[in-house]
Amino acid sequence: MRKTACLTLLSLAVLPPSTAIAAPTPRGQVIAIACAGAVVTEGRKVAKDNDLKHGQNPKACFGRMQIYDGPNRQFVVVAPSTSCPGGKAIDVYERSNAGSWYSFFEKPVCGSKLSIGPKDPWGDWMLTIDGKHYDSRGQFYVPVTY
């Protein structure tokens, strides 16, 4: 079961390639996305070791976030996408209890802004990408309209 925290919003921002962010950005602040540095090295290794394709794009940039209190941290991956109107797609990776990493989405979602919140009717956090809400349903996060 997920632990909940107070409602906070996080925005996604891409920093210059020279900026490296190692720790997850605290909730309530802009999620720093780096295109070089320790978080990128770690994110690329996770993507390669777990066959997560979006994170294997050579132009992928990574950030860290934490949806719930506790030990779990997520990688936010932003990479170019020719199939997206804005030219960018987002994915989120998290380590499973079994140890392998998985994607929150069946396929990367077009967009450039990610935020945590609001909560769904059952009290779990949703993700918002460019104003559209996504909630955990079964194996993946899917678009919702409540």
Image (spheres, rainbow, N blue to C red):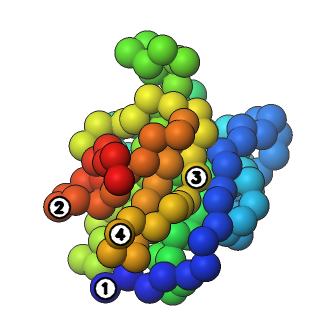
Whether label 1 touches label 2, CB < 8 Å? no
Question: Disc 2 or 4, which lies upstream in sequence?
Answer: 4
Residue at 44 percent of width and 85 percent of height: 3
State the SS at label 2. loop
Question: Does 36 sit above or below residue 135?
Answer: above
Taking the image as shown, residue 125 lies to the left or right of residue 23, namely left
Q: Residue at x 34, y 46 (%)?
A: 145
Rendered location of residue 65, percent (x, y): 59, 63
Q: CA distance from mark 2 to mark 4?
A: 16 Å
Q: Quadrant of residue 39?
A: bottom right
Q: CA distance from mark 1 to mark 3?
A: 21 Å
* Mark 1 neighbour class, 10 Å CA radius: few under 14, some 14 to 19, many 20 or more: few
Residue type, label 2: Gly
Q: Which residue is mark 2?
A: 138
Quarter of the rendering containing residue 135: bottom left
Label 2: few (<14), some or many (≥20) within 10 Å?
few
Q: Give the residue type that dot 4 points to.
A: Pro
- The amino acid sitting under disc 1 is Met
Residue at position x 43%, y 13% in the image: 82
User: Which residue is the site of mark 3?
Assistant: 115
Within-10-Å neighbours for mark 4: few <14, some 14–19, many 20+: few
Decide which of 143, 113 is in the foreground and name it: 143
Q: Is residue 60 left or right of residue 82?
A: right
Q: Which residue is mark 1?
A: 1
